[in-house]
Image: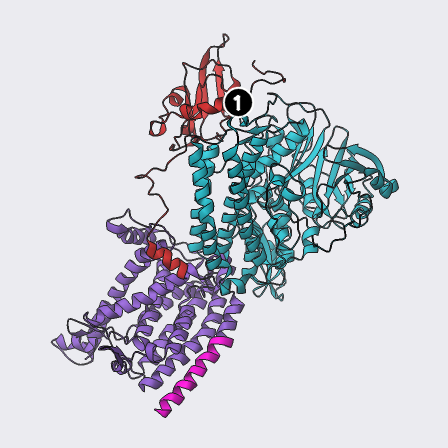
Amino acid sequence: MSLEEPSTPELDTGETLEGVDYDALESLLGEYAIGRESHVNAEAFVVRPDEVQAALELLRDEAGFDHCSCVTAQEYEDRYESIYHLRKYDDPTQEVGVVVPTTKDDPVSESANEVYRTADWHEREAYDLVGIEYDDHPDLRRILLPETWQGHPLSLDYDQEQPQVVEFAEHANPLREDHAADAQSDTMFLNIGPHHPATHGVLHLKTTLDGETVADVESDIGYLHRCEEQICQNGTYRHQIMPYPDRWDYISAGILNEWAYARAAEDMADIDVPEYAQVIRTMSAEMCRIASHMLAVATFALDIYGDFTAIFMYAMRDREVMQNLLEDLTGQRLMFNYLRLGGVAWDLPEPREEFFEQTRDFLDELPGKLEEFHDMITSNEIFQLRCVNTGVLDPETAKSYGATGPVARGSGVDYDIRRDDPYGYYDELDWDVVTEDGCDNYSRVLVRMREVEESAKIIEQCVDLLEEWPEDERNIQSNVPRTLKPDADTEIYRSVEGAKGELGIYMRADGTDKPARFKIRSPCFSNLQTLPEMSQGEYIPDLIASLGSLDIVLGEVDR
Amino acid sequence: MGTTMKHALGGETFTVEYPEETPEVSPRFRGVHKFSQERCIWCRQCENVCPNDTIQIVTDDQRNGEQYNLHIGQCIYCRLCEEVCPVDAILLTQNFEFTGDTKDDLAYNMEQLKNVPWYKDIDPLASREPDRSGWVGEGEGEVDYQ
Amino acid sequence: MTFTETISSLLPISGPIADFIGGAVASLLIISFLMSLVAVSGIWGKRKITAAFTDRIAVNRHGPFGLLIIVADAVRLLSKELIVPDGVDRPAWDLGPLVMTSSALLGFAVIPMGDLFGLNLQIADPQAGLAYVFATASIASVGLVMAGYSSNNKYSMLGGLRAVAQNLAYEIPLVVTGVSVVLFAGSLQLSEIVAAQGETLVSLGGVAIPSWYAFVNPFAFILFMIANLAEVGRNPFDVPEAPTEIVAGWQTEYSSVYFVLCYLSEFIHIFLGGAIIATIFLGGPAGPFLPGFVWMVIKILGVYLFTQWCRSAIPRVRIDQLIEIGWKGLLELSFANLVLTAVIVGLL
């Protein structure tokens, strides 16, 4: 926000100084809104399946909801439902849901793709897993499951026992397209992945090349789909879900992911978290962020430098320190399972002084180490030559694709849930949101490196707080019932700032101790959608660099 | 380039020569389980809390334990079983070194679980004891002992 | 007297047959030496050097300092199955690695490797030595194209095409910079060039600095080092392989023995590059105390170390940037250097 901002900012329709005025929104939607629901996070309006576009357009253009955070689809006994979770990039606390019910026998609803580009993949996922069809969708295919899959696994009548026997001949042959191509054509089809040194997991990029220039690129994901949503739907709120968030973004961002679930579940079941636990959470989450960003920088350097070079190992070395600290704290190096509903599992390890000392040592050495990284990476002329002005993602496109996290901030979108929709202890601490206006690969790397500094600042303040915390007030967990059964039809969508961006959880309770629908809004999933925008017309090395700068983790993309 | 040369000449390494030099493992580290039949009261809470049905308990009709099976290859090492156990009958040692030729080798039965060695003779219970108090009581909710 | 002549003079016969046997034995000795050099520095040294730059330990389990890794690796690589992909163009695919390796080895025929126990280890010393070295070294790009094009793999093809583009862009600056040295020395014969560098350039406090062309014309030396990096395809110019982009470029489909040949050719190329640099810029085998041959090897390994250093510290440039640097930067600079040298040599 600039300083010239007028003292009374221009308000969108339905926006008041306190937040969202849902009645005004309802009158704005007029006859589009045929009903109104109340979710824990925001009000939601029910819209007819053939008026989705018009309603969303109104909300985007008149009411300023420019961020389609997530699309959740689910099946009830009597209907299908798609929920569009909208919020604003300027103020993510202003939320509204758009609920689109469709009938069981004709589950067709209008696609939101025209309004929010990000709906493209989200709706494909909804079609794939739940079975809702979207009219006017440009490319409604399965996205996570193989094209030959029978049935929609999250629909109620899905038979899990049904064998998925697919003859080899029925599988899509990735090479066929190539042979079918016109012999006169100048382009070449190239499969980058699923096994390729630079795809950071099992990602398949169907690339059409014109010489060395990328004419078209299409990501084929789903190789690492592990039914994480369904696993969570089969686990109890109280204990059994918490180990799994560690496995979404498994690159040491575990606590950040756990916090996403913890935040949603705590808000849903109205659980308080002791302040002391919040400080520990904040500290450990930022440790995870450092570890995760270190790896992001390391692998990005790997993509640019082309070998397991010095930078990769140095970043690994520094990440190792962070991981040792996290191991002391949580008992595990990656799959922490440290947060509990209502607090954390353990207090700081004894002796506390040693832990503080080690943390401080790391923080003291960090500036020198970052200096080294800047020496080797960002101030290297060849590196700049490679990264500046490649993979350009302008802010408007980034918003429309629902990009968040360092990707959005590298495009100058000032959006950070930690500050804009505060949770934990973040609003009590002194730190800044990092943005860069370059919109290119270089800015995204810079954002990550500067965010490491900010995280270090947060950790330092947390350590100060923890050191002085009175001994008798070290309450790490509030009293939480052993079995949690939130009221039936409580719905909530809550997000936190994960390492890669906005990590949101949608949950619907049905009165039992397990969620009826558990939907993960993965930041990588939305960020990866921007890849074609960034790399079309550029060279293969730039495509690889852009992919690296997105810092995707396929475990989180495919869930 | 200068920075890398500095590192090269510095001669310091940060890697660990593993088998000769075992890494320092935090006392909280969660490794292979160790089971104590003397302590176990066969309350089956661990079996219930296990998120992916790794623990399988067989009891006779008097609720006397007959089998305690745990597939350490399937386990996700979340420590929930240790956390819910009221008598510390199942513990996660720091032992991370386990191998098997087949998946079946990793399906441990009661005897194998009892024989899991302590890692460097550390009994994790001591280091975790202070945190027991952090584990919360039943609250107002339904108590799910059987 | 060259190495060949020394050996053939030891034979009881004389004439063309003796010359042939002498040449064959001499080449065999030099090649065996090169192979062992590759074995030590390529398999073991490379690991150790990279590890040093990245704060690691690297091989240390196989024998003293892990040196037996060389044996282990040789057995491993040679005993692997040779996988011939479907649809490869067999003759070209088979010939590719051979062409690359032999072209690099051919270059060593004229390199003055210095003296060892009074023996001159130069196999042959033709009048047009330098031209010959450049010519043979460039044959490798034919091998690269053959390998890339015949592999029936798009990554290989991209790699092969990149290799050609790169070699075209860097061969010319390389040769032109080399010519500037020829202007100084007034001869293409490598022994003459080495001899010309024997004179003292300046004497500083009793230490005579020889007139190595690296000191006489450091500008040309730097140009040549850069062009040489591109010529041997090392960072920042390793685009024909570019593991993160096009998997392994032209060598994607090679396995087992063919892979060994590719690997070998790469290292011998680096050594050949080092030998050329040593010969025309660093006074060849000249150096105090130690025998000339040892100095030559030290200089070659010095250049090798430099390539490995670049590998762990410098990002790879993009193919279009690489060609731009080659055609728009190095080519102009190398011609400027040539003209300048010509003027200076003319004035002197």
Q: Position of residue A300 (x, y in %)?
A: 51, 54
Q: Position of residue C98 (x, y in %)?
A: 36, 66
Residue visible at 39% across and 74% down?
Answer: C222
| Residue, disc 1 | B135
Helix or strand or loop: what does disc 1 sit on? loop
Chain B hue? red
Q: Is residue A247 above or below residue C289?
A: above
Chain C hue? purple
- Does the magenta segment cover residue B106? no
* Chain designation of label 1: B
Q: How crowded is mark 1: few (under 14 residues within 10 Å), some or many (20 or more)?
A: some
Question: Of residues B40 and B103, which is closer to you in this image?
Answer: B40
Span highlighted in magenta in the image:
C328-348
Question: Of residues A69 and C169, which is closer to you in this image?
Answer: A69
Residue visible at 52% across and 60% down?
Answer: C154
In the picture as drawn, the residue positioned furthest to the top comes out as: B62
Going by the numbered disc 1, the residue's amino acid type is Trp
Chain drawn cyan in the picture:
A
Q: Can residue C153 be seen in this view?
A: no
Q: In this view, does A188 lie above or below C202?
A: above
Question: Of residues A233 and A486, which is closer to you in this image?
Answer: A486
Residue visible at 39% across and 34% down?
Answer: B25
Which image quadrant is residue C241 in?
bottom left
